[in-house]
Amino acid sequence: MGIPIPLSYTRLTSRFLVLWHLTLPIILWDDCHWVVVPATFISAASLFCIEEVGVLIEDPFPMLALDDLCQKAQKDIEEAIATENVIHAHLVAKRNYHSKEHSPNGWP
């Protein structure tokens, strides 16, 4: 279930659909005449759309913006680290200020 369909199978399916839709009007002409044109168009549009959806479902990652998402995550992490460093520096400075101001026994 987790293994994608091989590329050769997908290409073979596309080629078969093209060949089938090229021969469909020739085969149906004697029975349907000019109705063959819209029927072939509707058939081709629906089957090629279904095939394209199958290809997209099989491998959805190229259409996802994973690079942008990863860059945003990296930027947010770097920003959080920088904020943590600033907060840590403020706490150390505050601790040093209070330790100079007060004696160890708590009396000024």
Image (cartoon, helix red, strand yellow):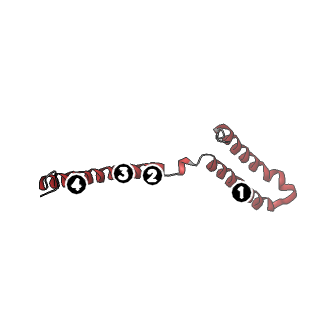
Q: Which residue is mark 4?
A: 90
Q: Nearer the viewer, mark 2 or mark 4?
A: 4
Q: Which residue is mark 2?
A: 69
Q: CA separation, marks 1 and 4?
A: 64 Å
Q: Crowding at label 3, few (<14), some or many (≥20) Cα neighbours within 10 Å?
A: few
Q: Nearer the viewer, mark 4 or mark 3?
A: 4
Q: Which residue is mark 3?
A: 75
Which of disc 3 and disc 2 is earlier in sequence?
2
Q: CA separation, marks 1 and 3?
A: 43 Å
Q: Which residue is mark 1?
A: 46
Circles 2 and 1: CB distance less than 8 Å? no
Q: Amino acid at mark 2?
A: Leu
Circles 2 and 3: CB distance less than 8 Å? no
Q: Secondary structure at mark 3?
A: helix
Q: Where on the picture, by quarter, is residue 102?
A: bottom left
Residue ID at (27%, 50%): 85
Q: Which mark is residue 27?
A: none
